[in-house]
Amino acid sequence: MPGIRIYADNACDLDKEYLEELGVKLFYMPVTIKDQTYRDRLTISPPDFYKLISEPGVMPTTAQITPREFKEEFEKALQESNDQIIYIAFSSGLSGTYQSACVARDMLDSPRIMVFDSKSASVGYALTVIRAARAVAAGENLEQVVAAIEDNIRRIEHIFIVGNFDMLKRGGRISSTSATLGNLLNIKLIAHFMDGSIFPLEKVHGLKKAKKRMLEIMAERGVNLKEQLIGISHSNDYEGALELKELIEKRFGCREFVISEIGAAIGAHVGAGTYTIFFLR
């Protein structure tokens, strides 16, 4: 009986071992730092990535996965079995990887290949991947798995404290003046995702107030939070992520969490010192 293969990419910020437990196969986006190219979480770990970009003047760059890479893997999967192939992609608002996968799908012209734009990043993206993998493991059919994916894509929320204003300045999200003032005055920018892209939401003085405000926004937007799988990601501060988890547990009674460190694919956009919470609205 044909099965369902779930694919994702490393922008979901989940460790390889956990993805293997879920039965999810991974594509890797390259990141270049000081003329050296790495594969995030494959040839460079998150701690090593943040150590490298902490050096003055070092700005990492990322590249999309190529259509050729997708075509080779999809073609192999088609030949190996009659499984349905589902690739859930890093947000098209931040990378061309989704478009690359669509090109590969169209080249192979097989109804067994489905490509979804998660419109998400980091553990927010991971929550959709996890839901899809759990649906497959539970024996749900293709229609049910697709419905679960599309539901998460519609409802996922990303609320985060930006670690480095310079990263957003480079991406054109804020002005040079705002970036300089923010870094100097300990202003924390709370941002969110809209249709798969990053947009500033509010500015708050100090990290403690910013975390408190994140939970207020979570309360305003979230639905039935106690029963949800909640995502938390951080860049170079696991203790800070645990503090967020405790605050969420205390306020909303949430019991199930996924906590992961932001890797190079996302860290290249937001920098060290970023904290993010993910949930469904």
Image: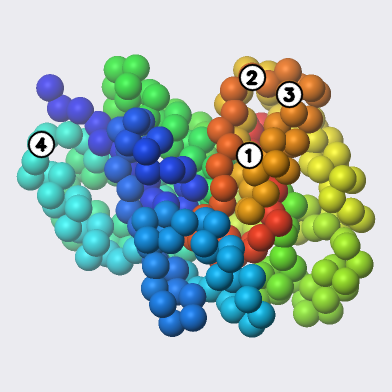
Q: Amino acid at mark 2?
A: Arg
Residue drawn at the location 81% of the way across and 43% of the way down = 211
Q: Between marks 2 and 1, how big is the CA–CA gap?
A: 13 Å
- Give the secondary structure at mark 2: loop
The residue lying at 77 percent from left, 76 percent from top is: 175
Name which residue type carries label 3. Glu
The quadrant holding residue 218 is top right
Q: Residue at x 30, y 43 (%)?
A: 25
Q: Circle 3 is placed at which residue position?
A: 249
Residue type beneath disc 4: Ser
Sequence-wise first label, 2 or 1: 1
- Marked residue nearer the N-terminal end (2 or 4): 4
Mark 3 residue element = helix
Q: For mark 1, what is the residue?
A: 232
Q: What crowding class fits label 4: few (fewer than 14 Cα within 10 Å), some (14-19), or many (20 or more)?
A: few
Residue 255, numbered circle: 2
Mark 2 or mark 3: whose residue is earlier in sequence: 3
